[in-house]
Image (cartoon, rainbow, N blue to C red):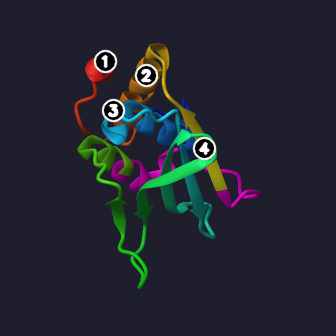
Amino acid sequence: MNPSSDSGLELKHSTIERILECAVTVNWNDLTKSQDNSSMRIEYGTGPRCSLEYLKLWSSSKRGYWHLLAEYWMRSSIEHRSGITFSRGNYSADFVRMLDAVMHHQDDFLASSPAFPDGLVQIKSPTTTELSTAITEMIEAMEQIGTHGPHISASRN
């Protein structure tokens, strides 16, 4: 169900960057596999309509050293296939479902600025409060786009 205003227009509550940050935060433990990752980052590129064409998820346990965890491409090419590809043995089924839903419903979120076609979202290891907030926002986002995604609970930490 998409919330709407009195005029019948959709209300977009979260930016695409924030909802991607929430998806990573909610799945932090699955994505890091108990490694001492102090931070992650999402690097993305947009197309002509300001929609995300690809994103890359990187992790770091030592300042200045980043390791590619996953890539998501909206379209296939000779170099890559569409969808998500994990590297370094990491995998999270819930993250796959959340990311797939968000990427295919980008219009339901506030777009990134057209002035910055490429972006970067930094994410530090979440506190209990940050995890709880991210869970709440992710549940709301999945409801907003009408996706009955994975079961998200507070027991994920």
| Spatial CA span between label 4 and label 2 | 16 Å
Residue drawn at x 35%, y 49% as measured from the top left = 101
Label 2 amino acid? Leu
| Spatial CA span between label 2 and label 3 | 16 Å
Q: Nearer the viewer, mark 2 or mark 3?
A: 3
Where residue 121 is drawn, which disc sits there? Answer: 4
**Which range of residues does the magenta coloring cover?**
100-118
**The stretch drawn in magenta includes residue 13:** no
Where residue 131 is drawn, which disc sits there? Answer: 2
Label 4 amino acid? Val
Upstream in sequence: badge 3 or badge 4: 3
CB atoms of marks 4 and 1 within 8 Å: no
| Percent position of residue 152, x then y | 28, 28
Residue tagged by mark 3? 34
Residue drawn at x 34%, y 34% as measured from the top left = 143
Label 3 amino acid? Ser
Question: How many marks do you count on the picture?
Answer: 4
User: Depth check: 49 or 24 in front?
Assistant: 24
